[in-house]
């Protein structure tokens, strides 16, 4: 059965999750992105690929940072961008989500960037649009609940490929609150598709999802053991709200056990890279000195993120 | 006496209300809009008619949906658009409305799209701008209090003309809370100017404005009687806040009497169209199955709405 | 020692304060601005000077009005503009200010317009960007705490030069809450650099900063005495929150002593101009009739403000 994000010819119609992308498709997206890295370094950072297209940033969950990355990417492709923060809008007037979508699609939208606190919302929107409008409108999932954040997954893969090359020889550790993290889920899926042979998930037992082995990863509660000889460390953001629940001890205790310090970093390979999706809690999941050390490629992730989003948008919009 | 929205030569200077437009002017706006319907279906949805013009979306009353339609229309005309949500801005700092307007006009604004909870605010702004700046700046009323919503009235006329052609043979029913609806007022004025011979207003007595006959309409409290043989049904949105007052029974009771069901729709002509300005309350003023049936042209209204707004903006800005 | 806003060659890298600008530099900015006044009067109000540049409006303190002036200026220079209201964004997620800046800079930003309630924040940002990115990114201070508001200072100088010509023969009075006003501070610095020989600061003792003489000004608590024979009156906005403290009597009492009335205005030279940075509190710091009289050039300040901001942005971005 075809994944709902693909067209009959196997091309991307939507980007809803990493799950369902082939290894070739991921590499093709990363190859396309590398041609856009140069655009943002030019004097005139603009190409006319989406000129006259209407892109709607549909954020049902507020995120200035992520919204900005898509807005910048769309503008550098010369699209017209409209930002909609939907908490304060029609939904509050009692209109259903799909009525809101139909309404915006009727304005001849070309692309929706959707962020929603409920897992699966972008799928539901994409399926509805397929039924109503064929393949005229594309949806990009900009983060849905705990489920998926595929452009973050792709930009993380871009970063790893940029610094490390061949995925099939890498040891990668994902550290932190894997259970609640859509970034972790997308990264693990992508790393698995790309053939990473040694993938470790490090965190307290309460924050490691059951059945992680079926995703090709190995769980580990001891960070010192888990980091040994890895090439890539992906730190996750710790949501403060987790503290309030019973899942976690204090921030200090968490930092002691799972915070990335220089001392723990020394257990990894000397040329290991340190990644973080941002925003960072310095002193909680990562020591400040590590965040600023030469091995940290956190700002490269952001830079490559614009290129990756331009790549995805241009591939969806080129149809 | 000339209507304040017209220039001495009879051309549009502002669009403040349907009232004061001639039948010829309305048809001219709709003709212009029909040339813009095609633009939104093109690959590059853009024309350079307002390139380098500055359009300010001045929303004193929040409405993401309406703001979006004007923003998209302006961008497809290549204008520069600035969104101002004025609740949180200068007015809260104690500045008067007209000082705010003077200030923005001094930035060499070309057009203000104004939405305000007070009836007459766009008139006051337009008159003030005429005094201060001659005919340099145009105002479009995007909804003022209970008074007027002229672009909605025009896009409704576009929709009716598109599906039904000649207005002078039509039976049209407007159903719901006519008393509080600026959409209803604008629609009734437009239908009357365009020569609709049989115009019915259906709703509970408490929600039908007095003197409706002087606007060329006939009041009717029995929906079954009122819908008989009509060609066009315009449903109105029921504002939930009306329920809290003494004007209305419960939503269920309202739906029973004035909700548009398949059974009531069957009383109209078999080719009757169903319209709604959105956002819909499914199950309150309209049955869900009716909202999605082939006779419903609710999404066409939205689509034509972009073209109608492009038409109005280009006519005002062409001067 | 070089001021941090200047490049080694003496050109502007950032605009952080009036302090540190030479008389020649100020005149050069005003000369550049005068070429942009014409652009905003054209039919197509746009020049391609910043095409493909990414400008971020970074407002840590909300100000729709000031944000709008920079947005309009950037769009008329053909830049891509992204608005970020940072109260509701990453900082609330516990990220540090400089991490936010690094993150946005990694998106290949060209320019940050920064407004912040803390004095010195734009300096800190500019210094950090210089360390991290050399001279690739420019910062414009759009108001920081009580410290500085340099584009307001420059547009005030443009207005004075436009109406009065030679600064070295002028008598200028700055009236009101000088102590808390970044506008006053920037104006006084600029007037002093430009060689104004008679500069008076008028206000209650509690609102005149100590050591004002060292800035080249003379303090005066009697408004009638202070206004005598001046060529230029710069009224300051009275922040309502000052009333609540013990610094001021009631608004009525303030108006009586320091409000600019027609009667007090008559003490100045007959061709004196009246300025105000807006938004005005009519009846508090300025009589309504004075705000609307021919000597008031308050809306000219706004108009010139767009040109001055275009000038500064084009000079910083031209590098």
Image: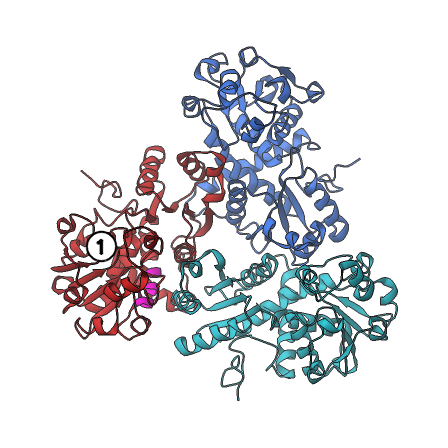
Chain colours: A red, B blue, C cyan
Q: Does the magenta run of residues contain A303?
A: yes
> Picture quarter containing residue C214?
bottom right
Q: Which residues are magenta?
A: A298-306
Q: Position of residue A159 (x, y in %)?
A: 26, 64
Which of these two is toward me, A157 or B274?
A: A157
Q: Nearer the viewer, residue C266 or B252?
A: B252
Q: Name the residue furthest bottom.
A: C1
In percent of width and height, residue B30 lies at 58, 33
The secondary structure making up most of the magenta span is helix
Q: Split into 4 quadrants, where in the image is the N terminus of chain B? A: top right
Expressed as whole percent of the image width and height from the top left, the position of residue C153 reads: 65, 72
Pointer 1: what residue? A26
With A246 as the anchor, is A220 left or right in this view?
left
Confirm whether the magenta stretch covers residue A309. no
Drawn side of residue B231 relative to residue B104, left or right: left
Quadrant of residue B218 within the rendered picture: top right
Q: Position of residue B43 (x, y in %)?
A: 41, 45
Judging from the image, mark 1 belongs to the subunit labelled A
**Circle 1 sits in a helix, a strand or a loop, which is it?**
helix
Residue C229 image-quadrant placement: bottom right
Asked if A93 appears above or below B102 in the picture, the reply is above
- At x 67% / y 78%, what residue is drawn? C190
Asked if residue B163 is positioned above or below residue C225 in the image, the reply reads above
């Amino acid at each position: 059965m075809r994944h709902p994000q693909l067209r009959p010819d196997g091309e991307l119609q939507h980007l809803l999750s990493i799950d369902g992308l082939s290894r070739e498709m991921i590499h093709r997206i990363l190859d396309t992105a590398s041609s856009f890295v140069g655009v943002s370094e030019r004097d005139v950072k603009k190409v006319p690929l989406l000129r006259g297209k209407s892109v709607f940033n549909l954020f049902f969950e507020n995120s200035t940072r992520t919204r900005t990355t898509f807005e910048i990417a769309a503008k550098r492709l010369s699209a017209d961008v409209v930002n909609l923060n939907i908490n304060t809008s029609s939904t509050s007037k009692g209109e259903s989500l799909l009525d809101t979508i139909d309404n915006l699609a009727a304005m001849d939208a070309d692309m929706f960037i959707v962020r929603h606190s409920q897992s699966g919302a972008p799928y539901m929107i994409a399926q509805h649009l397929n039924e109503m409008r064929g393949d005229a409108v594309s949806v990009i999932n900009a983060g849905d609940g705990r489920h998926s954040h595929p452009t973050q997954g792709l930009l993380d893969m871009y970063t790893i490929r940029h610094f490390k090359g061949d995925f099939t020889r890498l040891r990668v550790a994902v550290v932190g609150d894997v259970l609640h993290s859509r970034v972790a889920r997308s990264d693990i899926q992508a790393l698995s598709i790309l053939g990473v042979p040694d993938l470790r998930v490090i965190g307290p037992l309460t924050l490691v999802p059951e059945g992680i082995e079926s995703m090709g990863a190995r769980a580990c509660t001891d960070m010192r053991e888990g980091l040994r000889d890895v090439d890539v460390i992906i730190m996750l953001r710790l949501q403060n709200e987790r503290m309030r629940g019973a899942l976690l001890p204090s921030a200090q205790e968490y930092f002691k056990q799972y915070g990335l310090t220089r001392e723990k970093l020394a257990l990894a390979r000397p040329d290991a890279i340190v990644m973080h999706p941002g925003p960072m809690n310095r002193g909680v999941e990562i020591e400040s000195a590590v965040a600023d050390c030469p091995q940290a490629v956190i700002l490269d992730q952001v830079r490559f993120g614009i290129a990756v989003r331009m790549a995805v948008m241009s591939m969806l919009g080129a149809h």
